[in-house]
Image: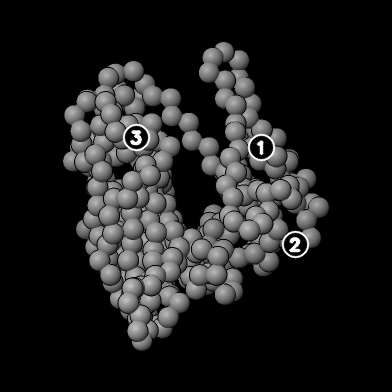
Amino acid sequence: MEQVSSTGRPVQITVTDGYDLKGFKGDTPVTFIRAEFNQVVLGDSAKIVVSPEGTAKYNFTCSFEFNPEGGVTLHDLAHKPVFLTMTEVLPKEKKQKEEKTMILGQAVVDLLPLLEGESSFETMVPLHPVPGSPLEPLRSGIKQCSLEVKVFVAEPLLTAAQISGGNLLKVTLEAAYSVPESFIPMGLLQNFMVGLQVPSAGEKDYPIFFKNGTLNGNHAEAKACYERTISFVVDASEMHFIFLRLGQIYLEEKEYEKAKKTYLQVCKRSPSCLTWLGLGIACYKLDELTEAEDALSEANALNNYNAEVWAYLALVCLKAGRQLEAEQAYKYTVKLKLKDESLLAEIHMVQETVGFGNPSF
């Protein structure tokens, strides 16, 4: 692989805003953000008052230096996220000398886009509450608190040749079921690590099989596995991710009626932004525009920062002939930086067909 420049380059992290925030004391708590990376504290934000609507403008910037010759390396960027800890500053009581604080939650920012050629990106990261935090949703359907974060480097850390010659593998574990009793935390919280052996050499394919998951990208075998799993399920909320994966496979294989049925089943028992989005996509593909808009509106109510939801709302409005709404949905799609280029191309094609929907026309 081509050698990486040894010149140190700053990586800048900016926390701009917080949304749907709450505190232990009062409706307008005072909070601050602490940023950490590679076991080093990068800094603390100013103490910001959260508005009654639950928003806060931090505009907090910190940075660290990337240098492959020492300090923070490519290995660190690939394996270590930035930790953002939100802390509430409690009001001082009488005769209290020292300021008291309580941690509300923590968010993580994945830096992998920097290893994929990006020099800057924006992301909306969920703020995970600590046990007992007021940020914990009291009931399902409540929006999860989140932070808006921007990451910036002056120039890409890797060249195109370095990226194409790399061997980066990313595996995401979304959920665990029927975990051993020893995994259940007693007293202090504990961390557990799961290892996955990946062969480093050999010409023969080596399938990686996840229980209730995908076998080496083989949709037929994965779909059969998912279908067997949900055939035994009484409560869909217990297998939320299984329904999501099966619905996604149906969409990819253009089995839209099956996708609609699958997403509808989980929407009734365990609704989320992604289940309503899946249902909306299936209905849109079936040309059921009213049902699609209803589902997408539910998804948008649960998370109005999902660019794909806005994209399909734009398509629905375009086909329904509603110019103003189509343009508004498209603006949000662009603002939230939709990553699905084929979906964006479909929007542009429909815009050209109907003659409206893009404010740049």
What is the distance, in whole Å, between disc 2 and disc 1 at their CAs? 22 Å
In the image, what residue occupies the spot 64% across and 26% down? 207
In the image, what residue occupies the spot 45% across and 63% down? 105
Please say if the residues under marks 3 and 1 sit with CB atoms less than 8 Å apart.
no
Amino acid at the residue labelled 2: Asp
Secondary element under disc 3, as helix, strand or loop, is helix
User: For mark 3, does the 10 Å Cα neighbourhood hold few (<14), some (14 to 19), or many (20 or more) residues?
Assistant: some
| Residue 307 found in image quarter | bottom left
What is the distance, in whole Å, between disc 3 and disc 2 at their CAs? 40 Å
Earlier residue among tags 3 and 1: 3
Amino acid at the residue labelled 3: Leu
| Image coloring type | one colour
| Residue 196 found in image quarter | top right
Depth check: give the residue in front, 160 or 4: 4
| Coordinates of residue 19 in the picture (x, y in percent) | 38, 69
What is the distance, in whole Å, between disc 3 and disc 1 at their CAs? 26 Å
Identify the residue position indicated by label 2 in the image.
235
Earlier residue among tags 3 and 2: 3
* Res 215 visible: yes
| Coordinates of residue 165 in the picture (x, y in percent) | 36, 21
The quadrant the C terminus occupies is bottom left
Identify the residue position indicated by label 3 in the image.
115
